[in-house]
Image: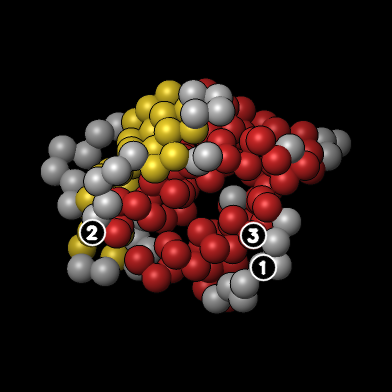
Amino acid sequence: MMDLRELYQDIILDHGRHPRNFRKIERPTHTAQGHNPLCGDRVTVYVTLDGERIGDVAFEGRGCAISTAAASLMTEVLKGKTMAEAAELFAHFHARVTGADEPPLTASLSADAERLEPLTGVKAYPSRVKCATLSWHALQSALKGETRTVKTE
């Protein structure tokens, strides 16, 4: 029987090879770019808001399997979420991958947080944390309306 680490590795590889929502949104309400100078990952995140809710979210870019898988999983869990829910999920995810104290998580978001669990193994490899969080930092920048490229240094 496959152990949990193997399952998580398979999920990351699948999302890295076949990313979901890998496309440009034609008329996004928000967009931002991210760059990880350490390994060269680049991502552009596109968001369409419907009021306070994320109606659509997608990304384009190039990077390692972790960076691509993280962006893919992020887009899957964020569709339909409010901006506040997206911020809560990022705070929880960021704490999980950095080993920080985890903020409380609304019960309705626990299943979404579990979907991000395959990426939490990067906390054992600090340089890879930047790969796993790049798309999330770009998303935050997009939602704030910032125009500068987010860098993970």
Q: Are marks 1 and 2 in contact (CB under 8 Å)?
A: no
Q: Residue at x 72, y 46 (%)?
A: 123
**Residue on which the image places disc 3:** 95
Q: Residue at x 54, y 63 (%)?
A: 91
**Foreground of the two, 126 or 84:** 126
Q: Residues within 10 Å of mark 3 (few under 14, many from 20)?
A: some
Q: Is residue 4 left or right of residue 15?
A: right
Disc number at residue 33? none
* Residue type indicated by callout 3: Ala
The Cα–Cα distance between marks 1 and 2, rounded to whole angstroms, is 27 Å
Q: Secondary structure at mark 2?
A: strand
Q: Secondary structure at mark 1?
A: loop
**Residue on which the image places disc 2:** 49
Q: Is residue 24 left or right of residue 22?
A: left
* Residue type indicated by callout 1: Glu
Nearer-N-terminus badge (1/3): 3
Q: Residue at x 39, y 42 (%)?
A: 150
Q: Residues within 10 Å of mark 2 (few under 14, many from 20)?
A: many
Disc number at residue 102? 1
**Foreground of the two, 29 or 78:** 29
The Cα–Cα distance between marks 3 and 2, rounded to whole angstroms, is 26 Å
Q: Residues within 10 Å of mark 1 (few under 14, many from 20)?
A: few
Mark 3 against mark 2, which lies toward the viewer? 3
